[in-house]
């Protein structure tokens, strides 16, 4: 039985009608004669013809026969097609549909057509190349004559696409979002009033045209780029900052294409039409490669005099000094050299941030992995009312990003509020405002930040410890350019007796990206301590491990629960502590599990629940490497248990099965029982957690003797 509610047969008609009514009301000043005529004529169709048109429009294929349009709620398809044709909502396929029609056919069908018409094909050709060959060598009339049924093309595709673009703010081929809403799959933000996302018809048409052009370049062939480049001058002139931004992206993409084609003149020409910093950078690099020093100097000086943002200034300053100031290293290299370097066990290789957290915790800091969560959350909570509660703050119920952030208008839309809230931050009284929003809106979905357990305490501790003016200046930058600054912030926030620090963590081979460098620069200029920590990895003989074994009610962590945990802590090959507890799984243990483990329902009836032991067990694991025999099973179950408590569970892992295979290859079996017999390890009470953990701990000792032997041999020299 489906867990989703049943939708009425013509649900899609209700969705299309809802979309038309919304657009007609909210975008009255944007709609032109074409859209108004379409809406009026559509209303004049019979209900079944309307349904058929929507069905055809919602499907991606460009051409249809009546056999493709079998729907139980629509009768007499041929009559409805004729009605649509008479009203201008459908037409018979013609030569202008040739290529799109070919694209709907399978490769074998295309190859069969080619053989029947003596069209030469190459074996290595793609389907698109085969279709082009058929199009070039088989006249459309002969192609169409090979089909016994009339083929239809839905009309008004451009108009419907434009109306959907107005509603969703992006290209959309269908109304699936409405269906998912009605099924309860996606949530929406219900409001009483919405604001048009476009200020004028020119902006809407320009946005639609440039968005279509950008989408056409995804996976495009060189000839597609060439065709678009040839008609670039016919695209709408930029009308607003929004359309400017789309045109900038398109011109940059065309410039990149011609640069890849080694056509430097064309590349520079298109880059010159783009206002993106990335286009300026590519132009400077190309000109420098051609030896045009004076032009390069002029562009660099212009960027230094009025940089678009920190990244532009950092690039221009760095390039100028390295290429013309005899400076051999870049700002990136300088920042890396200034940064601290630590070593961590190579089991942390995939978790450099966790290695850094452990490092700073030993130095007395409280470390939080915040990355791009802290500053957007602070901004969103401080200005929640202006972002989400104002009438028309969103463009539709499916939108999550506030309209006030479009084109960096927030600071100009709410100048007095921004000034007031920034002053509250600077004077150290911003927390009550944030706490009030947390109390009223915690958990509400939004397009700015995600909620996580402990967010309230983190923000409180941060605001109590951070320099108020530094907080104020950073939030002011977000008010001015939230979209440009919403990511790239450092990985870690450190809070300690001496204040706060921000740290970008880089493992071996990781690069510092320019936007990360710019965020470090932004925080430093605001008055924060901010820098880079480099983490190198090698086997660490002093690493502490916790070998864990669990027993459960079944094999799937999503549905089953833990019944027992046993853990053994090891350092330098010696057991230094153990931890064990039966756990009430809050569900019955199946008989076959009791037979396997010996753990019965009676044994766990009075045992603690997982929530009761979660703190104690987490404290036992803290700072260690999580080890288990088939580690993903144990780690996955414990992760699921902590997720139920809305708590993180993140440790470096080591698997004694995989490690034994690596260091002791060729054995008959690698189960815990066979390995224990192979190496004479005591395993008295197999399938009880602590007993299995003790046996796996002995395997870990064998593994580390081989894994760490190169280090120990070197130390002995």
Image (cartoon, helix red, strand yellow):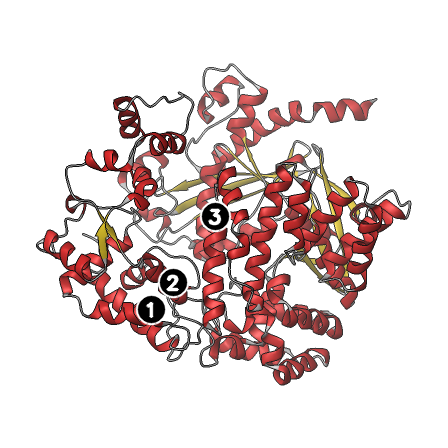
Q: Which residue is mark 1?
A: 35
Judge by depth and name the residue closer to the eye, 33 or 570: 33
User: Residue 374 placed where, x, y %?
Assistant: 61, 63
Residue 568 visible in the shown view: yes
Sequence-earlier tag: 1 or 3: 1
Could you tell me which residue is drawn at 14 percent across and 48 percent down? 70
Which of the pair 381/400 is nearer the observer? 400
CA neighbours of label 3 inside 10 A, class few (<14), some (14 to 19), many (20+): some
Q: Quadrant of residue 11?
A: bottom left
Q: For the residues labelled 2 and 1, say whether their Cβ atoms are less than 8 Å apart.
A: yes
Tell me the element at label 2. helix
Whether residue 456 is visible here, answered yes or no, is no
- Sequence-wise first label, 2 or 3: 2
The residue labelled by disc 3 is 639
In this view, the residue farthest toward the right is 326
- Which quadrant holds the C terminus? top right
The image quarter in which residue 371 lies = bottom right
The answer to whether 378 is drawn above or below residue 99 in the figure is below
176, above or below 472, in the image: above
Eyeballing the image, is 618 above or below 289?
below
From the top left corner, tell me how far across and down residue 100 is, in percent.
33, 43
Q: Secondary structure at mark 1?
A: helix
Q: Which mark sits nearer the N-terminus, 2 or 1? A: 1
- On screen, residue 304 versus residue 351, left or right, reads right
Residue located beneath label 2 in the image: 162
The location of residue 169, given as percent across then percent down, is 44, 64
């Amino acid at each position: 039985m489906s867990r989703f509610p049943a939708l009425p047969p013509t649900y899609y008609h209700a969705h299309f009608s809802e979309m038309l009514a919304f657009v007609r009301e909210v975008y009255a000043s944007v709609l032109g004669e074409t859209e108004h005529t379409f809406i009026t004529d559509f209303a004049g169709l019979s209900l079944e013809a309307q349904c058929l048109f929507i069905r055809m429009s919602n499907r991606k294929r460009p051409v249809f026969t009546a056999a493709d349009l079998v729907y139980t709620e629509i009768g007499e398809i041929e009559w409805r097609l004729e009605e649509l044709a008479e009203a201008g909502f459908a037409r018979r396929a013609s030569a202008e549909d040739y290529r799109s029609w070919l694209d709907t056919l399978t490769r074998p069908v295309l190859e069969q057509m080619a053989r029947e018409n003596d069209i030469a094909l190459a074996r290595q050709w793609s389907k698109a190349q085969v279709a082009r060959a058929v199009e070039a060598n088989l006249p459309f009339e002969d192609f169409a004559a090979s089909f016994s049924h009339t083929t239809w093309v839905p009309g008004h595709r451009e108009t419907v696409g434009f109306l959907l673009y107005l509603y969703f703010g992006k290209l959309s081929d269908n109304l699936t979002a409405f269906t998912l809403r009605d099924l309860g799959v996606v949530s929406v933000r219900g409001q009483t009033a919405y604001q048009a996302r476009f200020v004028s018809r020119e902006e809407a048409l320009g946005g639609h045209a440039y968005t279509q052009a950008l989408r056409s370049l995804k996976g495009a062939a060189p000839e597609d780029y060439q065709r678009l480049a040839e008609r670039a001058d016919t695209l709408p002139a930029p009308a607003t900052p929004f359309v400017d931004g789309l045109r900038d992206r398109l011109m940059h993409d065309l410039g990149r294409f011609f640069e890849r084609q080694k056509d430097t003149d064309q590349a520079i020409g298109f880059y010159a039409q783009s206002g993106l910093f990335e286009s300026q950078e590519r132009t400077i690099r190309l000109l420098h490669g051609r030896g045009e020093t004076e032009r390069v100097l002029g562009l660099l000086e212009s960027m230094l005099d009025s940089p678009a943002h920190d990244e532009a200034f950092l690039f221009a300053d760095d390039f100028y000094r390295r290429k013309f100031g005899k400076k051999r290293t870049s700002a990136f290299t300088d920042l890396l050299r200034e940064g601290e370097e630590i070593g961590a066990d190579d089991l942390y290789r995939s978790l450099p941030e966790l290695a850094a957290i452990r490092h700073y915790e030993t130095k007395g800091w409280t470390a939080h992995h915040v990355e791009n969560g802290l500053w957007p959350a602070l901004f969103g909570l401080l200005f929640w009312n202006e972002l989400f509660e104002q009438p028309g703050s969103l463009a539709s119920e499916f939108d999550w990003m506030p309209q006030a952030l479009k084109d960096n208008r927030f600071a100009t839309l709410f100048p007095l509020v921004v000034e007031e809230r920034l002053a509250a931050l600077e004077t150290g009284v911003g927390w009550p405002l944030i706490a009030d929003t947390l109390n009223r809106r915690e958990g509400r979905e939004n397009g700015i930040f995600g909620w996580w357990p402990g967010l309230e305490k983190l923000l409180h501790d941060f605001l109590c410890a951070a320099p108020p003016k530094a907080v104020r200046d950073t939030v002011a930058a977000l008010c001015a350019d939230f979209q440009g600054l919403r990511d790239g912030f450092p990985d870690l926030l450190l809070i300690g007796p001496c204040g706060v620090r921000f740290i970008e963590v880089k493992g071996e081979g990781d690069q510092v990206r320019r936007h990360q460098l710019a965020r470090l620069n932004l925080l430093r200029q605001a008055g924060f301590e901010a820098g880079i920590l480099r983490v190198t990895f090698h086997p660490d003989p002093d690493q502490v491990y916790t070998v864990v074994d669990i027993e459960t009610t079944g094999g799937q962590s999503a549905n089953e629960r833990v019944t027992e945990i046993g853990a053994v802590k090891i350092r330098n090959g010696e057991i230094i502590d153990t931890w064990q507890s039966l756990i009430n799984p809050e569900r019955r243990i199946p008989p076959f599990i009791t037979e396997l483990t010996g753990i019965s329902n009676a044994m766990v009836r009075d045992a603690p629940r997982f929530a009761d032991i979660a703190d104690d067990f987490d404290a036992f694991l803290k700072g260690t490497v999580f080890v288990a025999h088939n580690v993903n099973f144990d780690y996955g179950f414990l992760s699921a248990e902590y997720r139920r408590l809305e708590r993180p569970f993140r440790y470096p892992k080591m698997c004694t099965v995989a490690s034994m295979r690596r260091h002791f290859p060729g054995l008959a079996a690698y189960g815990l029982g066979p390995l224990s017999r192979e190496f004479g390890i005591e395993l008295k009470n197999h399938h009880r957690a602590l007993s299995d953990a003790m046996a796996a701990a002995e395997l870990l000792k064998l593994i580390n003797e081989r894994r760490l032997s190169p280090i120990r041999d070197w130390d002995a020299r």
